[in-house]
Amino acid sequence: MEESYKDRTSLVKGAKDIAKEVKRQAVKKVNKAVDKAQDGYTQRSYNRFQDEEDDDDDYYVQGGNYGVEANDDEGSSEATEGHDEDDEIYEGEYQGIPNMGQGKDGMVALGQQMHDEYKDRHELETERKADEEELAQQYELIIQECGHGRFQWALFFVLGMALMADGVEVFVVGFVLPSAETDMCIPNSGSGWLGDIVYLGMMVGAFFWGGLADKVGRRQSLLICMSVNGFFAFLSSFVQGYGFFLFCRLFSGFGIGGAVPTVFSYFSEVLAREKRGEHLSWLCMFWMIGGIYASAMAWAIIPHYGWSFSMGSAYQFHSWRVFVIVCALPCVSSVVALTFMPESPRFLLEIGKHDEAWMILKQIHDTNMRARGQPEKVFTVNRIKTPKQIDELIEIESDTGTWYRRCFVRIRTELYGIWLTFMRCFNYPVKDNTIKLTAVWFTLSFGYYGLSVWFPDVIKHLQSDEYASRVKHFVNEEVSHFVFNFTLENQIHTNGEFINDRFIMMKFKSVTFEDSLFKNCLFEDITSMNTYFRNCTFVNTTFYNTDLEQYKFIDSDFINCTFFHVRTGCQISFDDDYSAYWIYFVNFLGTLAVLPGNIVSALLMDRIGRLTMLGGSMVLSGISCFFLWFGTSESMMIGMLCLYNGLTISAWNSLDVITVELYPTDRRATGFGFLNALCKAAAVLGNLIFGSLVGITKAIPILLASTVLVCGGLVGLRLPDTRTQVLM
């Protein structure tokens, strides 16, 4: 009886071993078939491969004693050593890193792609969607195991420098504009192009670099875009012509446009769910630091005319150019630091690079554990789910095409891929979210930038009105044999006669001569700003070493007059002119005012929710913006501006967090880039509308900004709450 029981046990055990071996051979057959398809073998080769495998199956069926003779200690076979009975691990290329396993349902393993010969595209996309849902849950657990520590804080400061560079770029436009206008002799009609051209570059750059980040990776895209920004920002400080300067600032804006969508996508993918809202809000603070840095540097550098130098009359390097170089330092710092940071592991998993992602996650885990004093703690993750890869194969003509032809095809392919990813942002289930986010981003950007970017011009306009109210008028004056060697400022001389007078080593600041006569006069070593001679007559008059160019003489007549050593170009001088200091100080206060809003939003983002903060902040900002209408003095306007900025920053922070959480990984940077590009388009539109009305009325811009902010806040409340969701 006992021997019969042993025989039955041995028979059952042998049957199990045979079944296990057959199962192993079936999985091996599928994997080999897929490998053959990926290596590009022809159908004929593949059929020959199937015949060989059929022979192998016959061998194993006939030689069933192979499974019976297997040693109990060794398991079923060498290939299945360490495998679970119900969960086969993919036996692909092993590099010492745990690879993604293969379920018993026959799903294709890491990096393997089933050809359309076996499954149609719809089935592949369905499987990929299921894989992505499984990956989202597993990745959240992995990030929680890695912990939050030294690695996240190091990446926080590196990405913060890139975000700081974006904030600097926005403020540089307003600070450089007045000085660049004077230095390059830009008429008022062309001054707005400097601000618009930068935002145009940022708009195109946000869309392009955001889409590229979903194709080549967050780190690589950010490295390239920041390098482009740093190079052209540095170059723009040396160019002299206005056209070339616009060109450099255009490409500088194009480069920095990719910072915001890439930075937030990058950082969100290494944060656990309970840390995401708070730490993304802290990251937003670097944009404020960038504004403070730009304001402080402008305040400290631009008014110092003594920092400038010139090489003849053709090349002049004024202090505002030094300011442009200093503002490029955050960008350069971020590029250097990014070279030491790894790629986003979530992106690598999304494109099927399991081994690289596993190594980076292990690096995050080990870095944080060593910082906690627990270096012995082991990274326990063995396998990570990777979505099924669906690639489009495109022939590049590597043999017959020329190198520029291949480059053209490659660029066209990448751009087409970016466009396809962008169009997927309008597919179910993210279509409704994209439309709502579009409305919120546009309204918030239109209201914020419309009032903030051109606000220095509002202050300048108020100061000009006050300055014009103190102008001195001189009518029918007669001055003869007099030496002018002092500054004339804010004066209008009408129907005057100047006979045998000498104007030596003096300055004209905002002086106008109308219908006046200058006879036997001498102008020597003259510096002028906003000085014009309208319908004047000059008789036997000599001009020596002056900057009185022809455009300053309007409808004037010259009789027997001579000009020696006329200085060309516009002259910059901040002597006894505190308007520049005042503009920089106002922007410094306005930027510093967002600090409380940053702190509040970071602490409450995960407590009261993103939607409550977004809607409430936009509605309150709209109300505070409305009260700017009643500002009757500069101090009151500045106070209301600080309140407005402090309330608006919470909306910006919550909107950034919501945007990265509503889009899946394969289109997160693309969707964010599109919305950020829309943000810059709204900024240009607000810039044009508000700028054209700043000297006419302030009621329309303020009422318009207030209305769109309130409407955008109400739309924002309709977005789904992402506080408890894992990163898709």
Image (tube, rainbow, N blue to C red):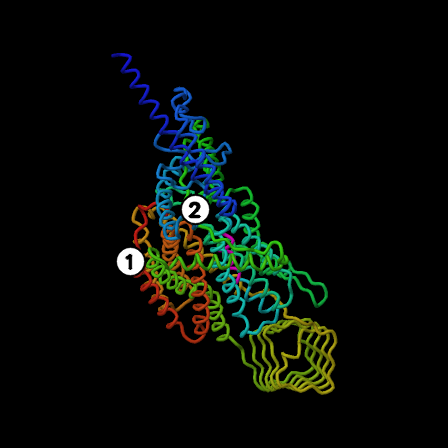
Total number of numbered discs in the rendering: 2
Find residue 395 and report its image quarter.
bottom right
Which residue is drawn at the image coordinates 59% and 62% (left, top)? 248
Residue 266 coordinates in the image, percent (x, y): 45, 47
Q: Is residue 172 magenta?
A: yes
Name the residue furthest left.
Answer: 1
Judge the density around disc 1: few (<14), some (14-19), many (≥20) Cα neighbours within 10 Å. few
Residue 511 percent coordinates (x, y): 58, 77
- Which residue is nearer to you in this view: 193 or 142? 142
What kind of residue is marked 1?
Arg
Residue 547 image position (x, y, % from top left): 67, 73
- Percent from the top left, x then y, of residue 38? 49, 45
- Circle nearer the viewer, 2 or 1: 2
**Residue denoted by label 2:** 114
Helix, strand or loop under label 2: loop
Query: Is residue 444 positioned above or below 68 on the image?
Result: below
* Disc 2 residue type (three-letter): Met
Side of 508 relative to 344 (left or right): right
Name the element at disc 1: loop
Q: Which residue was labeled with disc 1? A: 718
Question: What residue appears at the point 40 percent right and 65 percent down from the top-left corner?
Answer: 446
- Please state the extent of the stretch shown in magenta in the rendering: 164-173
Which image quarter holds the N terminus? top left
Q: Nearer the viewer, residue 675 or 494?
A: 675
> Which of 670/299 is in front?
670
Give residue 389's mark: none
Closer-to-camera residue (497/58): 58
Q: CA distance from mark 2 to mark 1?
A: 40 Å
Q: Main secondary structure of the magenta part?
A: helix
Q: Is residue 103 magenta?
A: no
Mark 2, other Cα within 10 Å: few <14 / some 14–19 / many ≥20: many
